[in-house]
Image: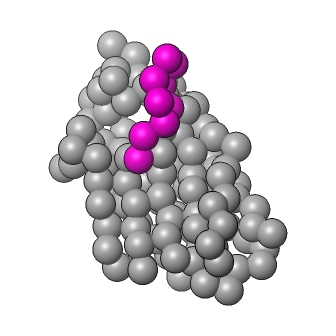
Amino acid sequence: QVQLVESGGGLVQAGGSLRLSCAASGTIFSIKAMGWYRQAPGKQRELVAGIRGGVSTSYAESVKDRFMLSRDTKNTLYLQMNNLKSEDTAVYYCNVLVSGTNYWGQGTQVTVST
């Protein structure tokens, strides 16, 4: 089993910044991929940013040049979000692929006010 603990969400004004963290623990032999997804009210969950194989990162077009994904050596994933916009408002979920199984965090709310 893998546990994911997310933190860092909150309320911020447009143009501000937040950093999300996702700490993975448990039976982790090999993490194939990690990423952040988000789901806004009435919309489908979408990939925001992900890292695969430890080196290959990808970003949604809407967040490129504003968000940055990073990972430390202790299986913690970070999402630095800058120049936040109202359309970034959503619940953000951490996702980890371990041994063929997807694990999800509980979600953290990000609200951007204008």
Q: Which of the two residues, 48 or 43, is positioned nearer the viewer here?
A: 43
- Give x and y (percent) for residue 85: 30, 26
Q: Position of residue 109 (x, y in %)?
A: 57, 31
In the displayed orientation, state which residue is furthest to the front: 100
Residue 40 is one of the magenta-drawn residues: yes
Q: Nearer the viewer, residue 96 or 11?
A: 96
Q: Is residue 107 magenta?
A: no
Classify residue 68 as left or right of residue 8: left
Q: Residue at x 40, y 60 (%)?
A: 50
Please say which color scheme the image uses.
one colour
Residue farthest bottom in this picture = 29
Q: Tell me which segment is drawn in magenta.
A: 39-47
Q: Is residue 67 above or below residue 26?
A: above
Q: Picture quarter containing residue 24?
A: bottom right
Side (left or right) of 111 relative to 98: left
Nearer the observer, 20 or 25? 25
What's the residue at 62%, 47% (across, down)? 7
Q: Residue at x 38, y 47 (%)?
A: 48
Q: In terms of secondary structure, what is the magenta stretch mainly?
A: loop
Q: Residue furthest top?
A: 114
Q: Is residue 23 visible?
A: no
Count of marks overlaid on the render: 0
In the image, residue 2 sits, relative to residue 8, either above or below, namely: below
Residue 15 falls in image quadrant: top left
Q: Position of residue 64 (x, y in %)?
A: 21, 48
Residue 104 visible? The answer is yes
Which x, y percent locates residue 8?
Answer: 56, 44
Q: Is residue 112 above or below residue 2?
A: above
Q: Is residue 71 left or right of residue 96?
A: left
